[in-house]
Amino acid sequence: MLAMSQTNNIERANFWVYGLWTNAWHPIRKNSNGTFTSMPAAEMYKILNPVFLDNSVLSTTSSPAASDGNPYSVRCGAFISNDNTKLNVVGVNRDKINTIPLQVNGVAGYTLVNARLLTATALNSDTIIESIATTDGAGNYILPPMSVIILEYTSLTTSIRQINSTFETVFLSPNPFSLETTLRTTTQLKDATLSVNNVFGKTVAQIKNISGQTVTLQRNALPSGLYFIQLTEGNKQIATNKIIISD
């Protein structure tokens, strides 16, 4: 796993997985009839290799002691792309008996695009079962014994900046603001909607039935911080941008 997550060692990892069929851990097994079988270690490699991005990120994991006496049961690693547009989290529950809850923090500014859980029917199973990972009412991912979770995120600010390059007809002033800001367009709006989303993607304010070329957004009770606005007409997205509310 460690070799797989390091870009500089990727050729070494490839050799370990696909070249050493006589290795004691048997990533690739040579059968008695001369054929080869890809074992779970190699299959896991194929799944995880694209998830390990350019750089590893310092991460902290708190979990109960494992049933075998090990001081921890769950460990996680985080990986980020060079341009900071993608962030992936990989977590492993090494406990052979207990199911452990996992809560992920510190991903503000990113939105979850894919959540996968890797399990098996038994500890000696050759088949990896992949399913969608979901959270419980407390926001915890539930990790069965000896399972792996893969969480893939994309940057909210980057996606908005890319979209915004297509639309150069919308202006915000002032930005940052403390009480109110005015959005101006160079084209006429008709029954448009302005939505304000927080960094978790939740809509916290909305103005509907906008017509004309200007609309004033009041802060009201919104806390200071970074937000993202979307201007739409029906199903058509007119513009997106980020705003900052300051005290």
Image (cartoon, helix red, strand yellow):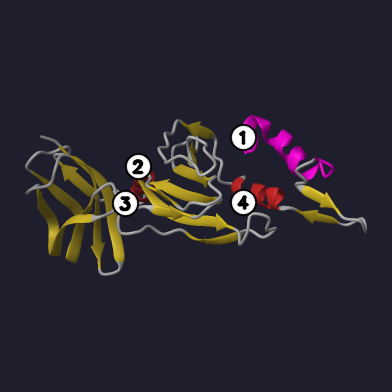
**SS of the residue under disc 4:** helix
**Which numbered mark, 1 or 3, is in the foreground of this view?**
1
- Foreground mark, 4 or 3, reads 4
Counting the numbered discs, the total is 4
Residue 12 painted magenta: yes
Q: Position of residue 231 (x, y in %)?
A: 23, 57
- Three-letter residue code for mark 1: Leu
Dot 2 amino acid type: Asn
The residues tagged by marks 1 and 3 sit, at their Cα atoms, a distance apart of 43 Å
Q: Are marks 1 and 4 in contact (CB under 8 Å)?
A: no
Q: Find residue 106 and report its horizontal and vertical position in percent.
A: 35, 39
Quick one: quadrant of the N terminus? top right
Name the spot of residue 226 as percent of width and height, x first.
23, 41
User: What amino acid type is highlighted by mark number 4?
Assistant: Ile
Q: Earlier in the sequence, mark 1 or mark 4?
A: 1
Residue at (73, 40) in percent of width and height: 14
Label placed on residue 39: none
* Quarter the C terminus occupies: top left
Q: Characterize the local packing of mark 4: few (<14), some (14-19) or many (20 or more) Cα atoms within 10 angstroms.
A: few
Q: Which residue is mark 3?
A: 167
- Between 225 and 183, which is closer to the camera in this rendering? 225
- The first of marks 3 and 2 along the sequence is 2
Crowd class of label 1 (few under 14; some 14 to 19; many from 20; radius 10 Å): few
- For disc 1, the marked residue is 2
Residue name at image x 26 percent, y 44 percent: 242
Give the mark, 4 or 2, whose residue is nearer the N terminus.
Answer: 4
Give the mark toward the camera: 3 or 2.
2
Q: Which residue is mark 2?
A: 105
Residues in magenta, as a range: 1-23
Among the two numbered marks 1 and 2 on one chain, the one whose residue lies closer to the N terminus? 1
Q: Return the residue nearer the eye: 84 or 181.
A: 84
